[in-house]
Structures are given as structure tokens and as C-alpha cells.
Image: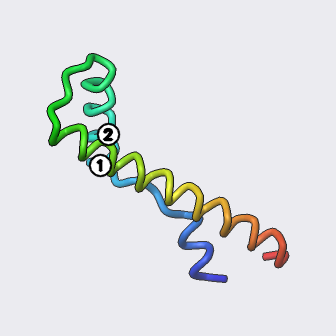
Amino acid sequence: TESARRVVDLRVDPDIQATVEVLAVRANDGVLTEEERAEYAALVDAADLISILKLKVRRRLQTNGS
């Protein structure tokens, strides 16, 4: 249960969030380099994976009444 709560409490590091925001602006402006595009895609994929994991953990905690 403790490990599950730690997963739910995960937050994005502010430096990483700032990088994502810069890359998002550059993507919207259509000026990403190939390296930036790969980094942005990896960060978005990681965020998606973490969001799915957190959702599953929350559901598990609710099911177990924790």
C-alpha cells in the first residue's frame, strides 16, 4: 500500500516540466529539430505511461479500500 501511494504521489520534476513546455511551444511553432522532436516524443510517452500507471494504482487502492 505504501509503494502504491508513492506512485500516486509522483510529480514531474520542475526542470523536466520546463523542458516539456519549451519543446511544446517549439513544436507548435513548427521549429523543432529532429533531436528535440525525439526528446519531446520520449517525454510525452513517459508522461503517458506514468499517468496510466497512476490511474491503475488509484483504482487498485480504491478497490482495496485503502
- Which amino acid does the dot numbered 2 rest on? Val
| CA neighbours of label 1 inside 10 A, class few (<14), some (14 to 19), many (20+) | few
- Which amino acid does the dot numbered 1 rest on? Ile
**Residue 29 drawn at (x, y percent):** 27, 16
**Which quarter of the figure has residue 64?**
bottom right
**Residue 42 drawn at (x, y percent):** 32, 51
Q: Secondary structure at mark 1?
A: helix
User: Marks 1 and 2: CB-CB under 8 Å?
Assistant: yes
Alpha-carbon span between mark 1 and mark 2: 6 Å
Position above or below: 62 against 20? below
33, 9: nearer the viewer: 33
Q: Is residue 42 left or right of residue 4?
A: left
Question: At x 40% / y 46%, what residue is drawn?
Answer: 44
Residue reaching furthest top? 29
Q: Which residue is mark 2?
A: 20
Q: Quadrant of the N terminus?
A: bottom right
Question: At x 34% / y 54%, what residue is drawn?
Answer: 13
Q: Is residue 29 left or right of residue 53?
A: left
Question: At x 55% / y 63%, what residue is drawn?
Answer: 9
Q: Quadrant of the C terminus?
A: bottom right
Q: Is residue 60 left or right of residue 50?
A: right
The image shows a total of numbered marks equal to 2
Question: At x 50% / y 58%, what residue is drawn?
Answer: 49
- Identify the mark at residue 58; answer none if there is no mark: none
Q: Secondary structure at mark 2?
A: helix
| CA neighbours of label 2 inside 10 A, class few (<14), some (14 to 19), many (20+) | some
**Residue 7 drawn at (x, y percent):** 54, 69
- Identify the mark at residue 16; answer none if there is no mark: 1
Position above or below: 29 against 53? above
**Residue 15 drawn at (x, y percent):** 26, 48
Q: Is residue 3 left or right of residue 63?
A: left
